[in-house]
Amino acid sequence: MDQHSQALIFIGGSGPDPEKYKKLLGPSDMVIAADSGLIRAEAFGYKPDWIVGDMDSLKDVSRLSAYPQDRIIRYPPDKDFTDTELALSLAWDKGYITTTLIGGSGGRTDHLLAILALFEREKTPSRWFTDSELVFPLEHSLELNLPLDTLISLFPVGPGPWEAESEGLKWPLNGLSWERGNFGLSNRTCHPSVSIKVLSGRFLVFIPLENLDAL
């Protein structure tokens, strides 16, 4: 199977401002809308290649008539997977390596936790743009140039043990003992150049969109 670059997956809930943050998404080869994520995809100026879900949160289902019916995969409301999971599976089945979620903030807390739980699995989304943050899993090394005093939070996810080192953060990660349920909340950059090196395990990193937009 050919390996493609990035699939953008628009999901329901609150999401980033299209006018301010579309440039952060980068180029894509495929766009998928999960249920009411169709509205967000259109707001970003995309005409999705695929629309998947049970359409229970898409208030105006007549919007679907503007798309080829063979590109709409409709599921019954009673199913074993969320619309986000179904969209991710479609992207992976099509050979996409990078999968970016856009939306999913606000609304029901259980839906929010369901998205976070996706990053605990062996195969995870590559990035997640909420209405105010970029969230991504980190298993190796990361180097970023960020404005001073940028907030960075880390949570250990997936199988442990977890260990990391850092440079440029106010509270270094070196030597910290991590267990499931621990987190590094509201760390801050104290140098324009920041590096994080994961020595073991996987971490979920949170960075405010407004600081990425300043680059």
Image: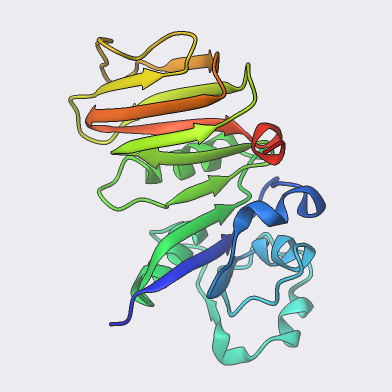
Q: Quadrant of residue 179?
A: top left
Residue 64 percent coordinates (x, y): 71, 80
**Measured along the vertical axis of the image, is residue 65 above or below residue 134?**
below
Colour pattern of the rendering: rainbow
In depth, the one of 146 and 92 nearer the eye is 146
Q: Nearer the viewer, residue 136 or 54?
A: 136
Give percent across and percent down for residue 49. Answer: 59, 80
Name the spot of residue 119 as percent of width and height, x first: 37, 42
Is 199 located above or below residue 23 in the figure?
above
Q: In front: 83, or 33?
A: 33
Position of residue 167 relative to residue 70, above or below, is above
* Up-down relation of residue 144 to residue 82 (above or below): above
Left or right side of 73 for 97? left
Q: Which residue appears at 43% of the width and 24% of the height?
A: 154
Q: Quadrant of the N terminus?
A: bottom left
Judged left or right of residue 137, residue 37 is: right
Where does residue 138 sit, x and y in percent of width and height? 36, 38
- Residue at x 38% of width, y 77% of height: 94
| Camera sees residue 11 | no
- Total number of numbered labels? 0
Residue 108 visible to an observer of this rendering: yes
Q: Report the residue at 18% width, 25% height from top.
A: 161
Q: Quadrant of the C terminus?
A: top right
